[in-house]
Image (tube, helix red, strand yellow):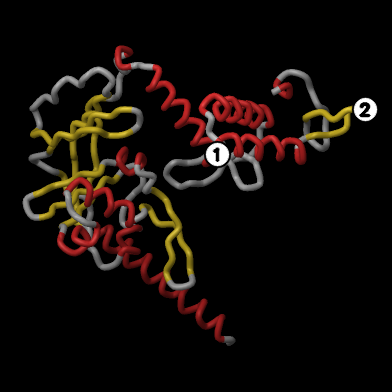
Amino acid sequence: MTDWRKARAVAGAIVVLATCLGLGLGFYLRLRPQSDALVLASYWKEGQRVLRQALPTGVRARTPQPGLVLVEERITAEAPLLKLSPFLLGVSLLPGRDGIHARLGKRDAYLTPDDLVAAQAYAVPCRLGSITVRCSVEVRKVLAELARELASTPGEVWRAARLSRFSVEQLSSPGQPDMRGVSVAGLTRGVQGAARYLAHVLTSAGWFRYEVSALTDATRNNEYSLARHGGAAWFLASAGIQLKDAELIAAAVRAARWLALQATQSCGPYRCVGPKKGTANLGSSAL
């Protein structure tokens, strides 16, 4: 057996061992129901949490100010997390269901599943030797968020904080935001955020990852839509011009170049948008 095959076999064995150890610990340290459960009242604005209260069950959260959305969740169960290694911590949570609780001295910080989605901390590749696997959470981002909540540092959180995972039950769902908080500046930020997201999911080749799982980062482009591509490229160009944003304009040009090179065919003496093999129809292709 050659050296690289031996190394690959050893690395594979390590991955299997680590996975088994993680699953075993997960079953051993299973979630335990909480008799004195707390309710996490989170106030959100434009996709970011701006305030959180940890309240005893039965205590009502205060009414949100105009422009804020209140989400109430009760912690139903909790279990400790072992900090044997960042890799094992990264595979110890269930994406979309588990949150993370950190206690540092007398201070507590909670990251709910919504917090982890907002921080884009779910489903990232992580390396174990020469093997790359997908972890449930990105430990670096988790520690940074906890450190910010605890007015500490990621290193101190890793060394000294007691970590646990918890599940939540949603008590109140986000309602319609108070329209009195809507402003031109806020709408402009919303347009810019949407455009920057489209630029973020535009590949270097020029096509959009327009169906992406927030939990696994998997792309689901089974049937790529030229109409969606055209609409997204049009919006990027319009937003880039209106906001005078060079990054958005460059993204629009890249999307248009892909369309010209990959999605056009000959229609008599002209070029038209449509599949390489098939019929170019009027209607959505006009985008």
**Residue found 23% across the figure and 29% down from its top:** 43
Residue 143 position within the rendered picture, expressed as x and y whole percent measured from the top left? 27, 54
**Residue found 35% across the figure and 16% down from its top:** 182
Between 102 and 192, the residue placed more toward the observer is: 192
Q: In this view, does 108 lie to the left or right of 278?
A: left
Disc 2 secondary structure class: loop
Contact? badges 2 and 1 (CB < 8 Å): no
Between 174 and 12, the residue placed more toward the observer is: 174
Residue 169 higher or lower than 111, as above or below: above
Residue 221 position within the rendered picture, expressed as x and y whole percent measured from the top left? 61, 40
Q: Mark 2 points at which residue?
A: 268
Q: Mark 1 points at which residue?
A: 247
Q: In which quarter of the image is residue 82?
A: bottom left
The quadrant in which the N terminus is found is bottom right
The total number of labels drawn is: 2
**Residue found 41% across the figure and 27% down from its top:** 189
Residue 170 position within the rendered picture, expressed as x and y whole percent measured from the top left? 25, 31
Residue 91 higher or lower than 56, as above or below: below
**Residue found 51% across the figure and 27% down from its top:** 243
Instruction: Indicate the amino acid at tag 1.
Output: Glu
Given the current orientation, which residue lies at the most extreme top position?
A: 180
